[in-house]
Image (tube, rainbow, N blue to C red):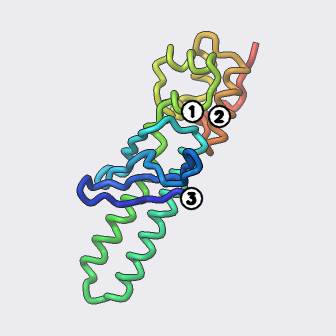
């Protein structure tokens, strides 16, 4: 079970996951999420993309729960309408920003992609998942040594993350 603990001194949320070392079970901090820039996630340990995805999903659920609890408090206190509107706008902005930006800055080094595809992306200067999703299948196909198998491997990795390449009007891609 992933937990989030607020560190008021550092103004961030620590991400804790269960760990067992020599039979002793404890919670280990694997990352932290900045309070002010919630899309800034600092990872302390090497994590699998599956665990990172679970952290992001749990973070989204945690934010949703916090938003719901705050909304319930605001609904009870109708005297502060202007403050309520500002808080609602701010919360909506933060939640939207977290959902849209959290995955864009993840390095392609942190996803499970084969060496050939990784080398092709590195040679093309594609360093993050955000940069990769801005490319279409046609753009990638134009890269040196990026054939059908490599393109399929990249698309499969993105599909596992719930992402796709940029869509183009020309849906047919010709392979020679």
Q: Secondary structure at mark 2?
A: helix
Of marks 2 and 3, the one in the foreground: 3
Q: Position of residue 108 (x, y in %)?
A: 52, 29
| Vertical arrangement, residue 119 with respect to residue 30, above or below | above
Q: In percent of the image, x 25 and y 84: which residue is there? A: 80
Figure check: 161 above or below 175:
below
- How far, Cα to Cα, is label 1 from label 3? 22 Å
In front of the other: label 1 or label 3? 3
Query: Measuring 47% from the left and 31% from the top, which residue is drawn there?
Result: 107
Q: How many marks?
A: 3
From the top left corner, tell me how far across and down residue 166 is, in percent: 57, 35
Q: Dot 3 corresponds to which residue?
A: 1
Q: Nearer the viewer, residue 45 or 13?
A: 45
Q: Do the CB atoms of the residues marked 1 and 2 lie less than 8 Å apart?
A: yes
**Decide: marks 1, 3 in contact (CB < 8 A)?**
no
Q: What is the crowding at mark 2: few (fewer than 14 residues within 10 Å), some, or many (at least 20)?
A: some
Disc number placed over residue 157 in the picture, else none? 2
Secondary element under disc 3, as helix, strand or loop, is loop
- In the rendered structure, find residue 111 and report the number of the disc placed on it: 1
> With 113 as the anchor, is 102 left or right in this view?
left
């Amino acid at each position: 079970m992933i937990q989030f603990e607020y560190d008021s001194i550092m103004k961030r949320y620590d991400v804790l996951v269960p760990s067992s070392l020599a039979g002793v079970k404890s919670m280990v901090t694997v990352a932290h999420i900045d309070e002010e820039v919630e899309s800034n996630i600092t990872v302390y340990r090497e994590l699998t993309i599956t665990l990172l995805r679970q952290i992001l999903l749990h973070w989204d659920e945690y934010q949703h729960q916090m938003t719901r609890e705050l909304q319930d408090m605001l609904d009870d206190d109708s005297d502060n309408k202007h403050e309520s509107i500002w808080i609602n706008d701010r919360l909506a902005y933060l939640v939207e920003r977290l959902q849209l930006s959290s995955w864009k800055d993840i390095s392609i080094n942190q996803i499970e992609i084969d060496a050939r595809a990784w080398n092709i992306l590195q040679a093309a200067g594609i360093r993050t998942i955000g940069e990769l999703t801005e490319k279409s299948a046609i753009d990638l196909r134009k890269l040196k040594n990026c054939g059908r198998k490599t393109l399929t491997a990249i698309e499969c990795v993105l599909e596992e993350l719930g992402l796709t390449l940029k869509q183009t009007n020309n849906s047919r891609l010709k392979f020679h």
